[in-house]
Amino acid sequence: MAGETLYRAAEDAALQAFAVNFPGGNVCPPFAPCYNDGMERVINDHPLLRTLNPQQQEAVSLDEGPALVLAGPGSGKTRVLTYRIAWMVEELWVRPWNILAVTFTNKAAREMRERVSLMEGRDVARAMTIGTFHATCARILRREAELMPFSADYLIFDADDQRSLMKSIVREMGLDEKRYPPRALLAAISRAKNELVGPDEYPVRTYYDEIVVRAYRRYEEALRSSNALDFDDLLMETVDLFRHAPEVLARYRERYRHILVDEFQDTNVAQYVLLRLLAQEHRSLFVVADEDQSIYSWRGADYRNIRRLRRDFPELREVLLEENYRSTQIILDAAQRVIARNPDRTPKRLFTRKQGGSPIVLRELFDEQSEADFVATTILSLHRRGYRWGDIAVMYRANAQSRVLEETFVHRSIPYRLVGATRFYARREIKDILAYLRLAQNPRDDVSFLRVLNTPPRGLGARTVEKIAARAQEAFLSRYEGTRLLLHTGILRGRQQRALEQFLEMVEGWHRDRDRLPVVALLDRILAETGYESYLRDGTQEGESRWENVLTLRSVLADSPEIKLADFLTEVALVADVDALDDEQDAVTLLTLHSAKGLEYRAVFLVGVEEGLLPHRRSLEESPEALAEERRLFYVGMTRAKERLYLTYVFRRSWYGGDQPGEPSRFLADIPDDLLQRQERPTGKLPKPSRFSMPWKQGAAAPKERRFHEGERVRHRRFGLGRVLESRLEDGYEIVTVIFNDNGIGVKHFLAEKAPLEPVSEF
DNA sequence: AAGGATTGCTTTTTT
DNA sequence: AGCAATCCTT
């Protein structure tokens, strides 16, 4: 976090001083730039190109002008982007502060800056602007705020803030929350904003749309009066700025003469328009995309942007990267077979020099617990065979699936790190602290105001909040200002009056000193004045761990003593889960398929490859496009694996408290048999459910010890050699599930004490 | 107003 | 099943 801030400071400095001297290292180009007509193989001895394959060379050494690089997974697109930057600086005489590189996550931005730094030196890396769309827009808006309907110290509302704001709006409008769920309204508004549709342009065809428009209007008013923007506003307002202030746009066009974009397939309309506005004049737009990895349409990503790009930049040069440097041929083949079934895609012939490889293991397990056990057992065995924990990842469709895995890993002493789930900055205690800090920055922030008004409890309940709201609304003011007024009317009882006075005094004190104190000192003062520590540490285990989180936040702040409050709050609002992923730590990574994009691991487990989960039920109900996206999601997961890929599905999965039968995902059917090592029950022969209907809790005191363990080799008198899929105790009986692979017998269940079954040594 | 009990809802994915 | 929001009691 501190590092990001430093970069940001450097960029700001560069922006302020356009005439800054470009620091050394940029000698005249020793080689003439190589232009390629696209047909001819690039034969170029330039040191920058020497280590690249012909397709990459072509992409990197293109002349200025719009370019689209269609890059398959593992085809070295990050490499192409960084080499392209180096090429531009060295060969095209581009000044680094004229470069804007847009990445999908802050982590990717950080990494790209590091790689550029290694190639071209720190000064070049520092002079460039690298960041996500949102972070870049946030900075532009802060700089240009005097032209905007909000001030430079605006706050960014996250999903939580949006929801609580919308909820209060729905109530205020007297709407039925069942009929008009705040989330649905927010989703409609977000969709509109992503397409740059304001409340006035919102198409009203039904009564529901009418409600959406009214809620939209009210929501915008509320954001304005809180001096806040939501995620989508960052993009939409920046487009607005550029459209209405041509002189500002002209300035940024000069400043960002050269634009590079990663993961272009996941841009939405607002982002595309932004790019077009900036790049239209100088037309130096270098874009990397893979339509097969487009997995964010639900967030407004619009794959048609690729077509729009071709239309708006007819001189566009296109390069296809097909050599894969990541996966074995087996993994790549399987993935291609899966993705090939999607309609309307550019066919690609991905290839790799890593011929052969281990077969993909397709494994059926009984339930999610045995699935987790299988994953754990296999990970332990990989670890014994020389895999580092950090070489391994487990991926799933929905965050809820991580829990069993976590518990099992703790049990089996496998170090792991979890991406997502309960994000640090989404925890209640952290949100509380942030709300205080946000109030210090901007007391008009209604969401934060309401959040901490009575946290810790200070006798200000629903009645008081109502009075404040009424006062604020009739004067069209924020809750904070409304409270000010309310205190002067003297209609409150003594206790509430005093509590409110005290509260406002505290907030105003922080607000006054917000830029005089280091943020960590401000935090300490907040903690002291609110008594937050004793409120949190209520003697429970949970209280202690919450307090520890607060201390973690404090140490983050203590580590960046120079950070400005406004910058800190912006950073916090724009961090993604993957951003926090630190690669130093040697641990197995648990993450959703969505956050796996752009990452790679020697061994990958894809769990829950079942109908209803992957593809997800919701997508099946939705549309064929949604189903195609699920397939891409599966494809993204598969192509994260370098050497080993394990796919699992279960016989029965607990869902919504009940049990649901598992059925292997339709996507599995597209993987050719010869790439698979099947460890599943032959179809049609399901074990009798009655035997397993008894609820069974892992780790509960079992009446007896098990003789057999998962993964063990066993011999059956009649069926021969097999492997234990599972062994569990039920009512004092040990039930062993064994798979007989070689002879087509498949899976059988035995009573351990009766069956002629014995363990066999591994060799 | 606070704290505990009950209901009802969730699980898609996130900058 | 687990959790948050809401209801209910004090």
Image (cartoon, coloured by chain):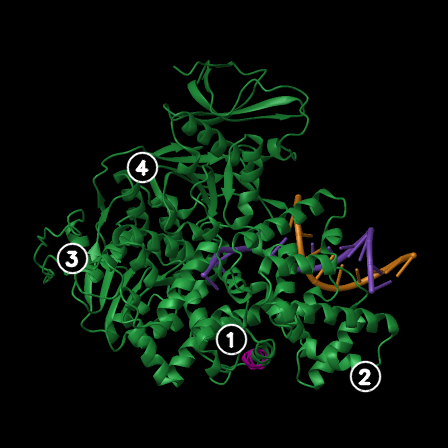
Chain colours: A green, B purple, C orange
Looking at marks 4 and 1 on the same chain, the residue that comes earlier in the sequence is marked by: 1
The residues colored magenta run A209-217
The front one of A189 and A227 is A227
Looking at marks 4 and 3 on the same chain, the residue that comes earlier in the sequence is marked by: 3
- Marker disc for residue A489: 2
Along the horizontal axis of the image, is A37 left or right of A179? Answer: left
Residue A191 visible in the current orientation = no
Say which residue label 1 marks: A152
How far apart are the alpha carbons under marks 4 and 3? 37 Å
- Marker disc for residue A673: 4
Q: Do residues under tags 2 and 4 come within 8 Å of each other at their CB atoms?
A: no
Looking at marks 3 and 2 on the same chain, the residue that comes earlier in the sequence is marked by: 3
Q: Do residues under tags 4 and 3 come within 8 Å of each other at their CB atoms?
A: no
Residue at horizontal 29%, vertical 76%?
Answer: A254
Question: Considering the numbered disc 2 on the image, is that residue within a helix, a strand or a loop?
Answer: helix
Say which residue label 3 marks: A58
Badge 1 density bin: few <14, some 14–19, many ≥20, Cα 10 Å: some
Along the horizontal axis of the image, is A231 left or right of A117? Answer: right
